[in-house]
Image: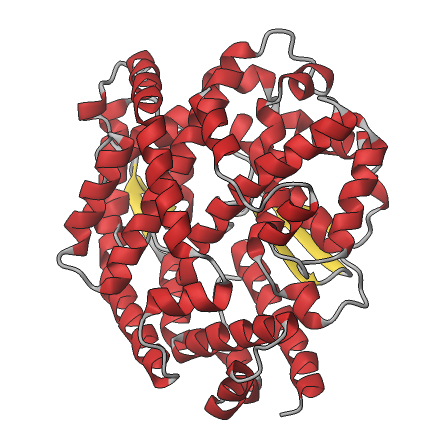
């Protein structure tokens, strides 16, 4: 297939698959149907096409196209299992309080359950349902491995590292350093916040952290009714008018089947972008809508005449970095006071810093665990629980050992994004001050970056901003406080 034809059809495929993700994730459909889409575009993922692109990786555009074709080839090999799993999740329910609540909504109930005994019981029921998915998830993982081998790759980890240019060896070393240097401060802060819930770390489960990070005590700082207006105000001060962005639609309606996890669906870039959130109240809603707006602004300002590879593909650490830049505002003292009118937010700022430390330690552990998982070492269910309990100091459910895994080391791209975010934020602060988020010039600078899509990876952008490349030291220093 000629490259021009491939790119045209690949862009049509991405539109179709993203629209399906949106409709099912937003709860607008009660079934998830990706198999027919893959079948319509089967020519994109033939052995001949993929092998041909793997031989044409000499340029950045060629590398991006080869990565796209390979990973979609692998997803195509398990499309039936993926579809079956998603449809089972959409139909699953959890028995709770004499009713059946949708499995997707159960985490919301968990986050709002103040009684620890009831939280533990609800999470046990959620994990029992999760365990029912594990045979299917395990089969899917095995099928991915077989498809990978058919393309000539010798290992999952090496394949992802090579195609996504993740530098996993270096990144793993950085994350081991992060875990070591943040261990004492994390343990102290965890103990403090759990004691406020009447718990100690040795009796706490992950569901207790779900409730802890729901943080209802801070709800008065983050009123539910002001969620969208706060986003509008934040963007307008950067010179970005949400009301004039007709290619961006906010979906904030509650629906039974709607995913509790906020997401951005760039269906057609830059012409049609959806920001989906299922508000449950409190600071997490604000962080989520700001994060997804970072993705959305990036998508709607991407230059429409960019090649498909630079418009839709590339290093997702870049778009995640832009998203983290926006969601980090919730722990910015100046943003809290000037945008939300919070006069004494120091307690919340310290809480938000602890949450960020937790998330980085969690993703550092995911990076270590996923490398072991894909190497096929031993009883991974028990290894999952042991590794995460060592890093996060609360009990983890071994049933979650496959559900808590993203394909193709997206965990690594998140980590790279967190590193990149601190660097771009420090650049903005150095040029426009601590109130950079109120300066339209900073907004125009970001729009200039957005125009470039994902042509440049996070390392290249960091060097362009004056750094030697991605550097974890500023992030680690921030987490230690």
Say which residue appears at 30% left-offset and 46% top-offset.
94
- Kindly tell me whether residue 95 is visible in this rendering: yes
**What coloring was used for the rendering?**
secondary structure
Q: Quadrant of the N terminus?
A: bottom right
Question: Relative to 431, is 206 on the left or the right?
Answer: left
In the image, residue 414 sits, relative to residue 83, either above or below, namely: above
Q: Position of residue 67 (x, y in %)?
A: 52, 72
Lateral position of residue 130 relative to residue 339, left or right: left
- The residue sitting at the top extreme is 344
Is residue 100 in view from this perspective? no
Q: Quadrant of residue 243?
A: top right
Residue situated in front as seen by the camera: 233 or 477: 477
**On the rendered structure, is 107 left or right of 347?**
left
Q: Where residue 138 sits: x, y (%)?
A: 25, 66
* Foreground residue among 76 and 28: 76
- Name the foreground residue: 462 vs 382: 462
Total marks in image: 0
For the point 36% across and 39% down, the residue is 362
Is residue 373 positioned above or below 424 on the image?
below
The foreground one among 150 and 120 is: 150
**In the rendering, at what x and y percent does residue 69 appear?**
53, 77
When the figure is inspected, residue 309 is found, relative to residue 438, above or below; the finding is below
Residue occupying the point 28% across, 63% down: 374
Residue 306 image offset from top left, x and y in percent: 77, 67
């Amino acid at each position: 297939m000629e490259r021009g034809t491939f790119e045209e059809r690949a862009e049509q495929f991405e539109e179709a698959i993203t629209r399906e993700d949106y409709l099912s994730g937003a709860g607008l459909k009660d079934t998830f149907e990706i198999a027919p889409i893959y079948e319509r575009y089967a020519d994109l993922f033939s052995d001949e096409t993929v092998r041909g692109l793997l031989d044409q990786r000499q340029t950045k555009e060629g590398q991006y196209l080869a990565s796209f074709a390979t990973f979609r080839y692998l997803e195509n090999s398990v499309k039936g299992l993926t579809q079956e799993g998603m449809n089972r999740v959409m139909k699953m329910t959890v028995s709770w309080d004499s009713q059946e609540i949708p499995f997707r909504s159960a985490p919301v109930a968990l986050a709002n359950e103040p009684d620890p005994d009831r939280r533990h019981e609800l999470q046990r029921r959620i994990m029992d349902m999760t365990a029912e998915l594990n045979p299917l998830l395990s089969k899917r993982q095995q099928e991915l491995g077989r498809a990978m081998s058919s393309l000539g790759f010798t290992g999952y980890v090496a394949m992802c590292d090579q195609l996504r240019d993740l530098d996993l060896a270096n990144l793993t070393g950085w994350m081991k350093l992060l875990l070591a240097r943040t261990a004492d401060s994390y343990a102290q802060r965890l103990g403090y916040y759990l004691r406020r819930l009447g718990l100690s770390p040795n009796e706490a489960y992950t569901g207790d952290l779900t409730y802890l990070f729901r943080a209802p005590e801070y709800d008065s700082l983050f009123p539910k009714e002001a969620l969208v207006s706060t986003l509008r105000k934040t963007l307008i001060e950067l010179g970005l008018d949400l009301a004039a962005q007709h290619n961006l639609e906010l979906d904030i309606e509650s629906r039974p089947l709607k995913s509790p996890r906020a997401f951005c669906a760039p269906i057609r870039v830059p012409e049609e972008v959806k920001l989906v959130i299922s508000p449950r109240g409190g600071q997490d809603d604000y962080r989520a809508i700001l994060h997804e707006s970072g993705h959305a602004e990036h998508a709607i300002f991407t230059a429409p005449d960019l090649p498909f590879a630079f418009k839709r593909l590339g290093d997702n650490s870049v778009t995640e970095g832009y998203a983290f830049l926006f969601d980090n505002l919730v722990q910015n003292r100046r943003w809290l006071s000037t945008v939300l009118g919070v006069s004494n937010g120091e307690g919340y700022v310290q809480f938000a810093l602890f949450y960020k430390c937790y998330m980085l330690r969690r993703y550092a552990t995911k990076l270590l665990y996923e490398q072991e998982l894909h190497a096929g070492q031993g009883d991974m269910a028990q290894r999952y629980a042991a590794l995460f309990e060592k890093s996060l100091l609360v009990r983890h459910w071994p049933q979650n050992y496959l559900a808590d895994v993203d394909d193709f080391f997206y965990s690594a791209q998140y980590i790279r994004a967190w590193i990149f975010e601190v660097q771009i934020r420090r650049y903005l602060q150095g040029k426009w001050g601590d109130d950079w988020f109120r300066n339209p010039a900073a907004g125009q600078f970001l729009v200039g970056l957005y125009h470039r899509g994902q042509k440049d990876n996070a390392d290249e952008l960091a060097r362009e901003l004056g750094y030697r490349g991605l550097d974890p030291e500023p992030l680690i220093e921030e987490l230690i406080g």
